[in-house]
Amino acid sequence: MSHATWGDVRDFAVRCYVPARQENGGTWRVHPEIPHAGAQLWPGTWIQASILEHTMPANTTEVERRLWAAADNLRANSKLRSHEYSVPVLGLIFLAYADYRFTEAKARMGEGTGRRSGITKDDYQAAGVLYVPEAARYSWLLQLPEGANVGQSINDAMRAIEEDNEDLRGVLPKLYNRLDNSILISLLKAFNFAEIADGLEGDAFGKIYEYFLGKFARDEGGKGGEFYTPTSLVKLMVEIMEPFHGRIFDPACGSGGMFVQSARFVEEHRRSPNAEISVYGQEKTAETVRLAKMNLAIHGLSGDVKQANTFYEDPHTSPGKFDFAMANPPFNVSGVDKDRIGVDPRLPFGVPTGDNANYLWMQYIYSSLNERGRAGVVMANSASDARGSEMEIRRQLIEDGGVDIMLATSTKLFYTVPLAATVWFFDRRKKGTPREDQVLFIDARHIYTPVTRAIRELSAAQIEFIANIANLYRGEPTETVHGSDALMQEHFPNGTYRDVPGLCKVATRAEIEVQGWSLNAGRYIGVQARAADDFDFSVRLGELSEELEVLNLEAHELEVRISENVQVLLEGANGEAMNDTVLA
């Protein structure tokens, strides 16, 4: 077979190789234009689907994968680096979905049918739908004449939407004139939701947007992970916190995933998110703030997300203000300017003396809660039993009665690092109850579902099971709609809470004090009992290998921190030596 140019690759991907819907128990039917399946352009190079058939299956996962293949064509055929192409792709998904929802709402409200007239922008926005002016309509972009500047037309469409939707001013991307017309035309066709919507219901398109956020986070490594928390972990946090009604705060909100999952939780309980919750967030970088605002808008949510450096700014005047708070802040941040912090009401237990911001974040979250507030914060494992001034802050947190649940998670849940993490849950409403003097420890390190060798997630049944442990501990109703029945029957056969070795343990404040105020779950829960004939050497070897990997990573983390501290000491010593020389 002769070699092909990139143009051949693009044309072939756009024109032909598109597997159709799954039929006959999962076998693939080949698109009729394809002469044979598994086509190669040259030896060793295979082309994935990049444009969808007009009739799509009612399978969100399949649609997500096909759309991703289309987006990947942009990276392969453009001058953009890997981390640069996420913004234009997410912008097009946003534009397509906004237009799709607008068209649906227009038909539903009966514009032009004689049932009512004069529907305004406010009517659309009251229905949770962005107003899309004619110049930004997706159908108009698809019908641009040959030779038109597609990139400039998309930029103009983004500006038109911003002009008619105040919350989006300055938010939408306008860099499409940097991309070739041919690539943009292919992407416009791929993301034409009017053709792929058949059979997809509810929040399917919002989930597609989240899928792309997750894929970009995986592909971009550390940069992507700054704005994205894995969906399954966020779902677990929300299920344990139960944000039915009130104000929700995230001081490190990233792309807004915590807010979206909170809204979805409210919807699942037959309530309207915009009527029940209001969201407030802040992020350091303007680009991430834009991602968060787009994510909220594509889910029909309104929110107040501001650009701010949380260490030095509090634009929402947060102390005591919120019913719920949740965050996945960056772990082990160093270099915070303590002089700029000054006296901060968000730090009721003081400023840690070490060069690590973990206990700053912890206090920002805790102090933001009102007297009935609940919170969840993802934190590095090392924070659970850190010493020195951090231990003193932790002691005060525990003695104040707000620390409610400590959840140890599996490794490889995060896309940027394979380290495990601990989720801290605060609950101010437990004061004056028997739980005020108690903390529930859950060891979920071995509860996960493999996705790839490097990535794990929590299934719906696993999320439900872990959340049910918290519900039993709190004396609240449990749920088994997602398939946690068997696990619940195995571990809690009487339907009431009990300590389970290797899984969960309720510890008193006195027990925690004996352990030096450590909140490391492993100190309390112990090891799951096994029968003599229930020993699987390969499984145990895998567990030990994983524990060794975690220890090695934590050791490296400590090496870096020690090196940084030594450097600070050396710089201080050198400065004193220079002063002595001058004085002499």
Image: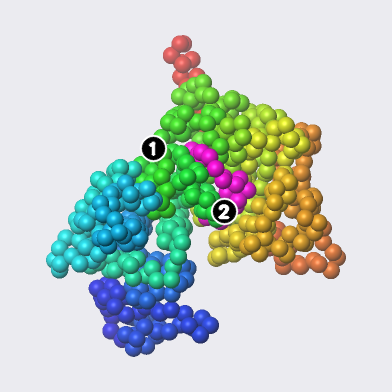
Q: Nearer the viewer, residue 371 or 575?
A: 371
Q: Residue furthest front?
A: 115
Residue 358: percent from the left, percent from the top? 56, 37
Residue assigned mark 1:
307
Give the labeled residue for mark 2: 269
Q: How many marks?
A: 2
Along the viewing direction, whichever of 332 and 413 lies nearer the viewer:
413
Above or below, 548 against 514 in this view is below
Task: Looking at the image, tell me whether mark 2 or mark 1 is earlier in sequence order.
Answer: 2
Residue type marked 2: His
Q: CA distance from mark 2 to mark 1?
A: 32 Å
The color scheme shown is: rainbow
Residue at 75% across, 67% down: 537
Is any part of residue 96 visible from this angle?
no
**Image quadrant where residue 115 sits:** bottom left
Classify residue 83 by image quadrant.
bottom left
The structure residue drawn at horizontal position 45% and vertical position 72%, both measured from the top left corner, is 58
- Magenta residues, start to end: 229-252
Residue type pointed to by label 1: Gln
- Image quadrant for the N terminus? bottom left
- Secondary structure of the residue carrying tag 2 is loop
**SS at circle 1:** strand
- Residue at horizontal 85 percent and vertical 64 percent from the top: 531
Answer left or right for 392 relative to 173.
right
